[in-house]
Image: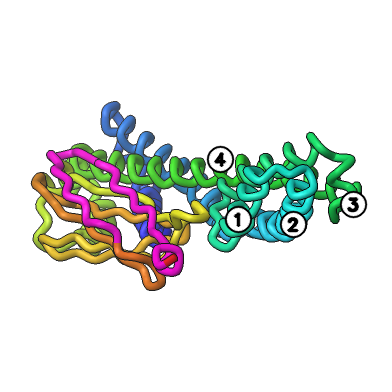
């Protein structure tokens, strides 16, 4: 996120300089189009950043709370189901329910939702017996309500996270488009207006020079590739912030943002090995990927909690 904010801020500074000298553009139709496209991209990037400024934790706080309440209710219901299966001499279902209870110790959100559906279906099929086996009608109704609410929250947060990921990707595309507009149109145009508009030239070029990375040619930037991806918890599906992403050669280290996303940009065409690690999780296998100029392959990691792997 911070990178996107810095990039957009630089673009907006250049846009203000361009807007300060409208006379310099008179008669240059293609350059005006490039300038206006640059401004439109900046407006859209600002909108996306406003959307992403809401921390992802707000999206998932309700999900965690809902899962916790469903877990408690489900644990009680499974106890009643085990007793009911015993009364019905249903040894297979009794063992299934015991397995469900054991799995609650290291559940994923999806498995929690699935177990809830199965337990509810079993209890509902023998409701009169269930009500005599340790669960009240109110408790059963609450379990159904919690299960339904949890599935709705899962769908909602999944959509929200997908939307945030799409926003990140759109930001990168817009930033790449703006860099190309600068190098292909606006830089050379401003240089050509140095004599007629020296103040314009000096302000623009000063801003451009102060932001350019050393030893980066124009062609290396516009033809560069990038590797992007998301790091999530394999059990919960939640994005993991501050996971370390390492590129073996050339050695590059970045961290995932609050949405679990990372970007390794301005890469030359070639083959790269990407690894990931985060304290408290097993280290996943490294991924080798070959990229061509302009490519943007996606390398995602789903990390397994160390305790779950040990179990």
Give the labeled residue for mark 2: 79
Determine crowd level at label 3: few under 14, some 14-19, many 20+ residues with C-alpha closer than 10 A. some
Q: Distance between the residues labelled 3 and 1?
A: 31 Å
Residue 12 x/y as whole percent: 40, 52
- Determine whether the residue tagged by mark 4 lies in a helix, strand or loop: helix
Which of pointers 4 and 3 lies earlier in the amino acid sequence? 3
Give the labeled residue for mark 1: 60
Horizontal placement of 89 versus 230: left or right? right
Callout in the foreground (4, 3): 3
Q: Distance between the residues labelled 2 and 4?
A: 34 Å
Is residue 288 part of the magenta span, yes or no?
A: yes
Is residue 75 part of the magenta span, yes or no?
A: no
Give the labeled residue for mark 4: 159
Name the quarter where the N terminus is drawn: bottom left
Determine crowd level at label 4: few under 14, some 14-19, many 20+ residues with C-alpha closer than 10 A. few
Horizontal placement of 177 versus 306: left or right? left
Q: How far apart are marks 2 and 1 (CA)?
A: 29 Å
Q: How far apart are marks 4 and 1 (CA)?
A: 12 Å
Report if the CB atoms under discs 4 and 3 are less than 8 Å apart. no
Which of pointers 2 and 4 lies earlier in the amino acid sequence? 2
Name which residue lies at 63% across and 43% down: 92
Which of pointers 4 and 1 lies earlier in the amino acid sequence? 1
- Determine whether the residue tagged by mark 2 lies in a helix, strand or loop: helix
Name the quarter where the C terminus is drawn: bottom left
Q: Nearer the viewer, residue 261 or 183?
A: 261
- Which region is colored magenta? 284-310
Tell me which corner region of the image, top left, top right, bottom left or bottom right, holds residue 203. bottom left
């Amino acid at each position: 996120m911070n990178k996107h904010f810095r990039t957009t801020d630089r673009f907006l500074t250049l846009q203000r300089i361009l807007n300060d000298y409208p006379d310099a553009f008179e008669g240059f139709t293609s350059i005006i189009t490039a300038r206006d496209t640059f401004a439109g991209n900046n407006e859209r990037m600002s909108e996306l950043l406003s959307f992403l400024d809401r921390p992802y934790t707000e999206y998932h706080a309700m999900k965690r709370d809902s899962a916790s309440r469903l877990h408690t209710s489900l644990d009680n219901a499974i106890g009643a189901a085990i007793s009911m299966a015993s009364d019905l001499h249903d040894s297979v279902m009794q063992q299934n329910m015991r397995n469900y209870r054991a799995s609650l110790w290291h559940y994923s959100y999806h498995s929690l939702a699935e177990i809830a559906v199965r337990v509810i279906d079993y209890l509902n099929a023998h409701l009169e017996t269930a009500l005599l086996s340790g669960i009240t009608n109110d408790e059963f109704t609450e379990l159904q309500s919690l299960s339904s609410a949890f599935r709705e929250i899962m769908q909602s947060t999944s959509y929200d996270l997908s939307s945030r990921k799409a926003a990140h990707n759109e930001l990168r595309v817009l930033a790449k488009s703006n860099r190309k507009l600068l190098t292909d149109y606006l830089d050379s145009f401003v240089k050509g207006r140095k004599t007629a508009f020296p103040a314009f030239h000096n302000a623009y070029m000063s801003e451009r020079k102060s932001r350019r990375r050393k030893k980066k040619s124009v062609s290396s930037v516009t033809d560069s590739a990038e590797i992007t991806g998301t790091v999530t918890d394999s059990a919960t599906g939640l994005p993991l912030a501050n996971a370390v992403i390492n590129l073996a050669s050339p050695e590059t280290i970045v961290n995932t943002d609050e949405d679990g996303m990372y970007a390794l940009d301005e890469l030359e065409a070639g083959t790269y090995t990407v690894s990931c690690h985060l304290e408290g999780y097993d280290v996943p296998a490294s991924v080798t990927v070959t990229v061509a100029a302009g490519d943007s392959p996606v390398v995602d990691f789903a990390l397994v909690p160390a305790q779950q792997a040990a179990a």
